[in-house]
Image: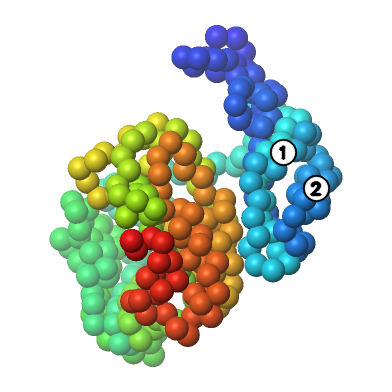
């Protein structure tokens, strides 16, 4: 192995000249996904190419684009990026420290501080749960780690649950505490609904054939991302979808400030998602999100699919 090179089973990588890996080593292939506020059409495609060139991409290729809503077009673009990075010159500060066990902690406190450390802890206000505070303070500790009560040169006070903040502060002052431990459980009343979320379940099935399961091998996959986009999945390139289990491949979830934004974000994510090699209900999900009745949202019931997509219910 030569200097600044990492040998693998298939290739050698020059870490002084790192570029994106697409189809081949150092080809600089990158993929961009974005939306432009222009109407869908050939002019929109050319606009996206010109924008990609201004970003520095060579030979940009629009591999996919679709109308998100009137006046807005979503794009997937491939191109060649030529800049390189010297990986060997990167210096990232590392946090280094020494982990001491219970005995070593006591010895260190005695040697360097020369007195007992006083700690006061409590679960405050409406919090009636003391599991966390107990695990830290009580002698038995948790999972094989003893609590502070077993530490030499540590005096620990556990005030229990539902302790008013004023009482905790008063106790800390009374015993001249060096540290205060506070536990506050978040309850259901602390949770507030904000925005709107939508989930699409991507299945290995063909809607045009009565949603028949479609097992097989996934030959290519690209998973969307971005702010407010979440993907729960187990699949990958070359993954073989079995015939004897649930056909669900992925949960695609988005969150927006309101329903309209969530719909637009889901349409964008569905447009970016690529699963090749097997049939899926991906396009059908996109059709649903694009349906005016669905977008309006006031006439959605269990008869929505038969009413709006009768061709899938034969």
State which quadrant residue 310 falls in: bottom left
Task: Count residues near mark 2 (Cα–Cα under 10 Å), then give few for <14, some for 14-19, many for 20+.
Answer: few
Task: Count residues near mark 1 (Cα–Cα under 10 Å), then give few for <14, some for 14-19, many for 20+.
Answer: some
Could you tell me residue 204's position as x and y percent?
35, 47
Mark nearer the N terminus (2 vs 1): 2
Viewer-closest of 180 and 142: 142
Viewer-closest of 239 and 127: 239
Question: Dot 1: what SS?
Answer: strand
Outermost residue toward the top?
1
- Residue 186 seen in the current view: no
Could you tell me residue 297's position as x and y percent?
49, 80
User: Which mark, residue 158?
Assistant: none
Residue at 38 percent of width and 42 percent of height = 235
> Marks 2/1: CA distance?
10 Å
Residue at 60 percent of width and 19 percent of height = 13
How many numbered markers are drawn? 2
Residue at 47 percent of width and 85 percent of height = 298
- 34 over 304 or under it: above or below: above
Question: Dot 2: what SS?
Answer: helix
Residue at 29 percent of width and 60 percent of height = 153
- 98 over 309 or under it: above or below: above
- Residue 29 seen in the current view: yes
Relative horizontal placement of residue 129, taking residue 70 as reference (left or right): left
State which quadrant residue 260 falls in: bottom right
The residue wearing badge 1 is 61
Relative horizontal placement of residue 260, taking residue 177 as reference (left or right): right
The residue wearing badge 2 is 46
Could you tell me residue 6's position as x and y percent?
55, 18
Viewer-closest of 78 and 98: 78
Q: Quadrant of the C terminus?
A: bottom left
Could you tell me residue 172's position as x and y percent?
37, 80
């Amino acid at each position: 192995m030569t200097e600044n090179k990492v040998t693998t089973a298939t290739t050698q990588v020059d870490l002084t000249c790192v570029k994106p890996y697409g189809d081949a080593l150092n080809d600089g292939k990158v993929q961009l996904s974005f939306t432009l506020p222009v109407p869908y059409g050939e002019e929109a495609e050319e606009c996206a190419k010109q924008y990609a060139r201004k970003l520095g991409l060579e030979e940009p290729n629009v591999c996919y684009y679709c109308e998100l809503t009137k006046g807005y077009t979503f794009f997937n673009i491939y191109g060649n990026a030529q800049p390189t990075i010297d990986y060997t010159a990167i210096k990232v500060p590392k946090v280094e420290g020494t982990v001491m066990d219970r005995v070593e902690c006591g010895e260190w406190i005695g040697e360097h501080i020369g007195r007992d450390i006083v700690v006061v802890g409590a679960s405050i206000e409406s919090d009636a749960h003391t599991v966390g505070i107990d695990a830290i303070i009580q002698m038995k500790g948790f999972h094989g780690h003893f609590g502070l009560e077993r530490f030499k040169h540590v005096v620990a006070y556990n005030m229990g649950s539902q302790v008013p903040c004023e009482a905790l502060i008063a106790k800390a002052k009374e015993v001249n505490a060096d540290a205060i431990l506070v536990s506050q459980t978040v309850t259901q009343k602390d949770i507030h609904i904000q925005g709107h979320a939508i989930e699409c379940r991507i299945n290995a099935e063909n809607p045009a054939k009565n949603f028949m399961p479609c097992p097989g091998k996934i030959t290519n996959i690209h998973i969307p991302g971005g702010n407010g986009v979440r993907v729960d999945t187990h699949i990958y390139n070359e993954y073989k979808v079995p015939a004897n289990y649930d056909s669900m491949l992925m949960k695609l979830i988005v969150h927006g400030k309101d329903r309209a934004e969530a719909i637009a974000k889901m349409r964008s994510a569905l447009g970016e998602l690529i699963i090749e090699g097997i049939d899926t209900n991906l396009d059908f999900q996109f059709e649903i999100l694009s349906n005016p009745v669905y977008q309006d949202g006031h006439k959605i019931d269990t008869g929505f699919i038969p009413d709006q997509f009768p061709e899938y219910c034969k």
